[in-house]
Each structure stands twice: as structure tokens, then as C-alpha cells.
Amino acid sequence: MTAPVSRVPMWLGGEPVAAQTDAWFDVLAPADGTVLAQVPRAGREDVDAAVTVARQGFFTWSGQAPAAREAVLLKAAELMAGEGGARFLDTLIDESGSVIAKARNEIRYSVDLLRTAAGECRRLYGDTFPNDNPERLSMVFREPLGVVGVVSPYNAPLSLLVKMTAFPLAAGNAVVIKPSEETPLTALAFGQLLLDAGLPPQALSVLTGFGGECGAPLSGHPGLDCIALTGSTHTGIAVGKAAMEHMRRCQLELGGKSALLVLADADPEEAAAIAADGIFTHAGQICMANSRIVVEAPVFRDFTAALVRRAEALHLGDLRDENSRYGPLINRAALDKALAQVADAVARGATLLTGGEALHGLTMKPTVVEAPPLDCALWREETFAPVVSVVSAENLDEAIELANDSAYGLSAAVLTHHLQRGLAAARRLRSGAVHIGMHAFQSNALAPIGGLGLSGLGRSGGRYSTEEFTELKWISVEAPA
């Protein structure tokens, strides 16, 4: 007899609950389709309840001293560092299809994010400025916004959720979290960790559900003061419109079509190794992945051949195999989209150098496509799969022009041994971040992560998150000398 699937409740003001309709849905493992658990299918009524509780919890949490908020976040970091494997490792591997090395790195980065956010509790700096009237004082205070709705993605379901939650909490906000329906178990475990660390229960809710039924009502809820989303550009535009209807703050980290420039002085083998890590890690399901590569003509053939060798040599084993370098895509729709983009580019004249097919299940063979048409979806739209396009440029000016010809601008990278040339390129690239001598996706808890154009609005990380999740208030005082 098959054992019954366990049901994992969601968090409403720190209390484990089912959805008000008592509806549930399955959480599937992308590696083999196994049902991992069932979670509540939250709807509008659950969103209303969570926001109501959060508005009460905001006053409790924001009223605590900075040292008290700092202590909670440091305790959360301590718990994650000490129990991260037990709490999160298996869940990350099973529900997001992460290989074990990626899952470990995500836990380590999450600890760093929590510690960094804890430090921000004491940095809600204000200001003073001079007044022409000597009998008046002008002061600027930085205050929390209130209730922040957090909509987190499936590709890095722990670290991105931690970043999106810890910094608003550091500033004194309450949070209502709606994780991706693909990876709710990680979010529920993180909610438990925050409660174990001493976060006041009413300051936290974690609602599990689908975008239209739960995410959209949360994004458009009049009781929110801010909505923070990491996700697709399509979803971000909808969330931004909902935010503007209520003139509320929004922080959006959206899609990317990041460019990697390989300049003529770069070593082709070394550059190919960096580029392969930058696109094939986590099967390319990283918004900053360098999915477009522009190579100066003198090294184009050597680089492309080396990249193909790297792609074909990547080890695919069990997700818990220490040597495995990538795993499955999150669902069938993601695989079908990637395969269709590759097929369309090839039909229109691109050269398929390797890959372009599914290996088994939801796992796609690492794919390298040469010279796709510059107006095709593979070159212009986010693929979110282990697929990279490579084109040649005659010189640096043409390489930068090709890289900047995009509606996105999240991250970029330049591979060169000539620092001044790399810096000159970085200054001209239209992107929220540029990395020299590295691939396009890099993480730092202090860095202002965010993009231009269709890659989003605002910045997250360190003090930049504090600025996003606080409001400035000018107070003046009549104070005769």
C-alpha cells in the first residue's frame, strides 16, 4: 500500500493553517515527478487574513529596539548555519532540482544574507540639514514602510527569499510571503526558522498557492505598503501596474538576457570554462546567466570549440552526486519553451553546435547555438535553460553594440586580461552590473542587485535594500536659540 502524502500547512501570523477553502495541491520533484507533499491552495480570503494580521504585527515588530531585531536575524543565521543541511538541503535538491553543490552554496549565501541584514538594523540613519531661519531645525528620519508583500521565485528558492525577506524585516517591516508554487516547501521551512529565531508571529505569514489565485490578490491588496517580486518580466509588469493603482512602493528583480563579451586577448580555454559555468550552472535557470556571448573574431573559433567541449563534458548524475553539475528544468513548460526557441533559431539559419534536445524527463542537454538571427526569440528573450547563443564581433565597438541591443539589462561580463579595456567596456555596457574576468552571475550580500529596462526596478542588498524598504520623513522644529 502506498503511504499517504504528507500535508504541510502554511503560516498565518505564525500559526500553521490550511487554506480557508481546505484546498490542497501537490508539490512535485522535477527530477522524477514524485509527489513530495501537499500544501494549501491559498486564495483571496487567505490573503486578506494574512495582510490584516501583518498590519497588527508591524507595530509589534517595528516597535522593537534595533538590537532586538538584530538578535532575531542573527539567531536565524545561527540556526541556518548549524542546521542548514537538516532543514533545507534535501528540500532544495528535491523540489527545485538543485544539485547538491548548488544547494549547499545557496544555504551558505543565505547565512551571509541574514548576517548582513542583521547589521542593517542599526543603520537606519537619518540626517539634518541647514535652514535659512536660525530658529528652526530640520531633521530627516528613515522609517519602515509597514507591510511588505514578498513574491519569490523557484530557481533560488531559499537565498532569494532570504534576501527579499530579511532586509524588510531588518528595517522593521512585517512580511507576507507568497513563494513560487513550484517550491513552497523551502519557504515554509524558512518561515519556521524565523519563528524559531524569535520573530513575533504576527509579523510573518507564508501563503502557498498559485499566481492568479494568491499572488495577484496579494500584489493588488490595498493593505500592502510595498510589493517585492523576483520573477519573470511578464509577472513584474502586472505587479508594477497593481502597485501603481495604489501608489505603493515596488521592488522588482526581473528577467535577464545577460551578455558575456570575450575579447581578443582572452585565453579561449579559460574563457570557455568561465562561460560554461555562467550558463550551465543550475541548468541555466538563473536570471543573470550569460545566455548571450559576443566574441571578438580572432578568438571566435577557438573559444566556440572549447565551449562545445565543456558543454559535452558536463557530468549529469544523481542530484546528490558531488560531481553532478546540472539537473532538470523546473517543469515541462520550461523545457518545451527552451526546445522551441532553439528549433526556431536553427530553422532560421543558426547553427546548432551541440545539444538542442532533452536527455530524459525534464533534463535538457547543454546547448550551444552559433549565429542565431538577432531578431529571434533565442537571442532576444529569456530562455531560462542550459542554452547559450554565440556570435562574432569584429571589434570592441561592435561587441558592445551587440550586447546593448537588448530590452534587458540585469548583468553583463567581460573576459579580458587588459584591465583598462575591460573597464572601458564595463562603463559602456547598459547593465545593472558588469563583472570583469568573471561570468555574469555573481552574488554579494552588500551589492545593489537590480537591472535596467525589462530587468526591473530598484536594487536589493545591504544598505540599498534598507533604502528600498524605508521611507524618509522630514521633521522641522521651531527652536529659538
Image: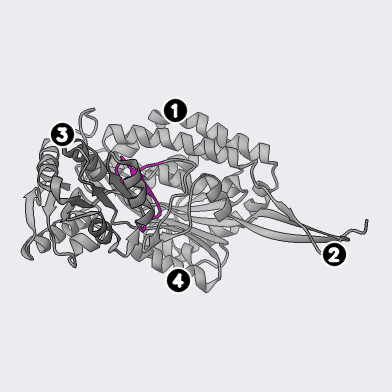
Compared to residue 115, the image places residue 406 above or below, namely below
- Image quadrant where residue 360 sits: top left
- Image quadrant where residue 240 sits: bottom left
Within-10-Å neighbours for mark 3: few <14, some 14–19, many 20+: some
Location of mark 2 (residue): 133
Residue drawn at (38%, 48%) of the image: 184
Which quadrant of the rendered structure holds the N terminus?
A: top left
Q: Nearer the viewer, residue 450 or 431?
A: 431
Location of mark 4 (residue): 241
Q: Is residue 30 visible?
A: no
Which quadrant of the rendered structure holds the C terminus?
A: bottom right
User: Distance of mark 1 from mark 2, alpha carbons?
Assistant: 58 Å
Residue drawn at (11%, 62%) of the image: 345
Sequence-wise, the earlier of marks 3 and 4 is 4
In this view, the residue farthest toward the top is: 82
Q: Given contact means CB atoms under 8 Å apart, are the residues at marks 3 and 4 in contact?
A: no
Compared to residue 176, the image places residue 245 above or below, namely below
Q: Nearer the viewer, mark 2 or mark 4?
A: 2
Sequence-wise, the earlier of marks 2 and 4 is 2
| Secondary structure state at the residue bearing disc 3 | loop
Q: Nearer the viewer, residue 113 or 300?
A: 300
Q: Given contact means CB atoms under 8 Å apart, are the residues at marks 4 and 1 in contact?
A: no
Q: Which residues are magenta?
A: 430-443
Marker disc for residue 83: 1
Q: Amino acid at mark 1?
A: Glu
User: Distance of mark 3 from mark 4, alpha carbons?
Assistant: 43 Å
Q: Is residue 169 rendered to the left or right of residue 181?
A: right
Within-10-Å neighbours for mark 1: few <14, some 14–19, many 20+: some
Location of mark 3 (residue): 315
Sequence-wise, the earlier of marks 1 and 3 is 1
Residue 241 in picture, x, y percent from top left: 45, 71
Q: Given contact means CB atoms under 8 Å apart, are the residues at marks 3 and 2 in contact?
A: no
